[in-house]
Image (cartoon, rainbow, N blue to C red):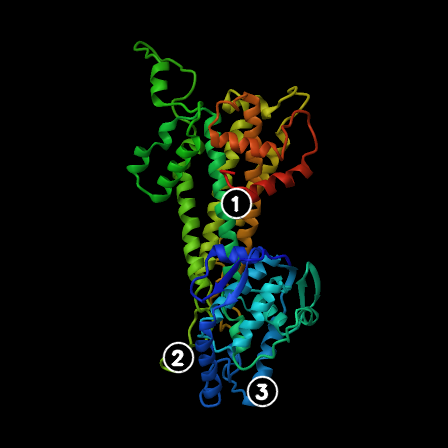
Amino acid sequence: MSAVTKGKTIIITGTSLTITDIVAIAMGNAMVQLDETLKKKVDASRALVDRIANEKVIYGVNTGFGPMADHIISPSQAEELQANLIKSHACGFGSALDSWNVLAAMVVRLNTLAQGYSGVRWKVLEVLTACINARVIPVVPRYGGVGASGDLIQLAHIAAGLMGLGDVFYNDKRMRACDALAVINVAPLTLKSKEGLALINGTSVMTGIGALLVDRARTAFAHAMGNGAMALELIEGYDDAIAPFIQDVRPHPGQRYVAAELRSLVAGSKLMRTRTMVQNEVTMDHNDVKKIERPVQDVYSFRCMPQIFGPVYETIEHAAEVIEREASSVTDNPIIDMDKEIFMHGGNFHGDYISLEMDKLKIVLTRIALTLERHINFFLNRNVNKFFPPFLNLRKGGLTLGLQGLQFVATSTTAELQSLCFPNYIHTIPTNGDNQDIVSMGTNSALLAAQVMDGLDVVLAIELLTLAQATDASVRVDKISPAGRARYDAFRKVFPAIIDDRDLSNELDAVVSFVRRNRHRS
C-alpha cells in the first residue's frame, strides 16, 4: 500500500468527494491535497472554540462524554480529556481491517473536518493529509463499533495513530506509530480541546468501507450482466424477453437499463432465438395434444434477468448516491454554526443511512448469487438443459467428473450468503449507559456486506468458468456475439478448459482475481 501513482492529486474541498476519488486514494492511485481556501473557515471555527470554551458549557469541550456529560472539566484538563478519550476508545478487538478500508475512512474523515464546522486546527488536517499520502495506515481492529456516536472505536485507533500511539502499517510493515511518523518527519499530534471528539465522532469508517464496496458491487454487477448475456446466448435464449416493448410497459429504470445492456451484449450473436423462428418451426395440431422439441419460454433465471437485475442495479446506484452525500457531510457533534457563533448539539453521527444501504446492498448481491447459481445448475444438469454433457464433462463421463465438484462450491457459498443477509440495521442493542439507546450497527453492516461481496466474487468466477466450459462443449465460439467472444478469449488466457480432472483449488484464485479486476467488456 505504500506505492502511489505520481501525477494524480485529488483536491479535498469538503463537498465534492466521490466514490471514484475514495477508491483511487485508498487503492494507491492518487494523493490528496487540501484546498487552501478552506483554511480561513477552519481557523475561524477553531478560534471560536478557543474563545468561548471557558465561557459556556459545550459538550465534549468542557464536559465529560456520554452519560458523564454532567461533569464539567476545567480548562487545565482540556488536553488530558481529549487524550483520554482516544486512549480509552482505542480498544477494538480482532483482526486488522484491510488497509484500503482504513485509508478510505481517513479520506472521508479529512473531507468532513475540512469543511470548518468541527473546530479543529488546520494542523490536524495537515497531519491527517501527510499520513494518507505517505500511507501511514493505523492498525484498526475489526470489532468494536456500534455506529451510533459514529465509528468511535475504529476512528479512535486512527486518531491514536496521528498521536503516535498504537501500531500502523507503513511500507507494508507493521510498526509503532511514533516510529512511522518519525520516518515521514511528522510530529505526533497533541490534541487540543474538542479535537479528539471531532476525530472519532462520525460515520467515516462505515462510509469509507461502503464507498469501496459500491465500487466493487458495480464491477460485480457488470460481470453478472456479461455472464448473463453469454448464458442467454449459449442456451439459445429467446430475444423477446429483453426487447424494449416489454420493458416499456413496465418502465422501471433499472429493468430498462438491464434489458438494454443485455441487448447490446448479445448483438451480433448467431445463437439467439426470435419469436418468428418459433412460429416457423412449430406446426399446430388441431386434433390432439402435441409435444414440441423445446419450451416456448426460458426458465425464469434467464427470461427474467431484466426484472431480477433491474432492482439490483437501482439499489447499487442509490447506495452510491447516499454514500457520496455522506462522504461530504459533517457527521460529528457538536458542530459549529459560525454565523450565530453557537455550538449545535445533534445526532449527525448516527449511521442509519449507511447501515440501511449496506444491508440492502448485501441483499441484492446475494440475489445476484442466487440467480447465477441457478445458471450454473442449468448448464451442469443434463436433466434440465437436455443438451450439454453432464457437468460439462469434456472427456469420459463416468470416469472424469468435469465441474461436478465446483457446483458444490457455488451452492455452499450461495447458501452462506443467504445466512449473512440478516439485517444489522434493525439489530440494535442499547449501550453506553443507555445514552446510546438505539444504535445503527453501520460498520458491522458494511463489514458483513464485504463478506457477501467476497462470496459473490466466487460464484461469479464459477459461473464464468462454467460458461467457458459450456462454450467448448457446444463448439459455439464462432457463433457467440463479439462481446461474448471477447469475454471467452480473455478468460481462457487465465484459465484453460477442464478436460482431464485436475486440482482446481489454486487455479480458482486466478479466476476470482480475474472477476475482481476485469469489467464485462474487457
- Which amino acid does the dot numbered 1 rest on? Gln
Residue 49 location in percent, x, y? 47, 83
Spatial CA distance of label 2 from label 3 is: 26 Å
User: 411 left or right of 280?
Assistant: right
Most foreground residue, 391 or 516: 516
Disc 1 is placed on an element classified as: helix
Q: Which residue is mark 3?
A: 77
Q: Nearer the viewer, mark 1 or mark 3?
A: 3
Q: Are discs 1 and 3 less than 8 Å apart at CB?
A: no
Q: Residue at x 62, y 22 (%)?
A: 394
Q: Is residue 446 visible in the rendered structure shown here?
A: no
Q: Residue at x 42, y 73 (%)?
A: 346
- Which amino acid does the dot numbered 2 rest on? Met
Q: Residue at x 68, y 72 (%)?
A: 182
Spatial CA distance of label 2 from label 1 is: 48 Å
Q: Which residue is mark 1?
A: 418
- Which amino acid does the dot numbered 3 rest on? Gln
Spatial CA distance of label 1 from label 3 is: 51 Å
User: 88 left or right of 32?
Assistant: right
Outermost residue on the left side: it is 249
Residue 311 location in percent, x, y? 40, 44
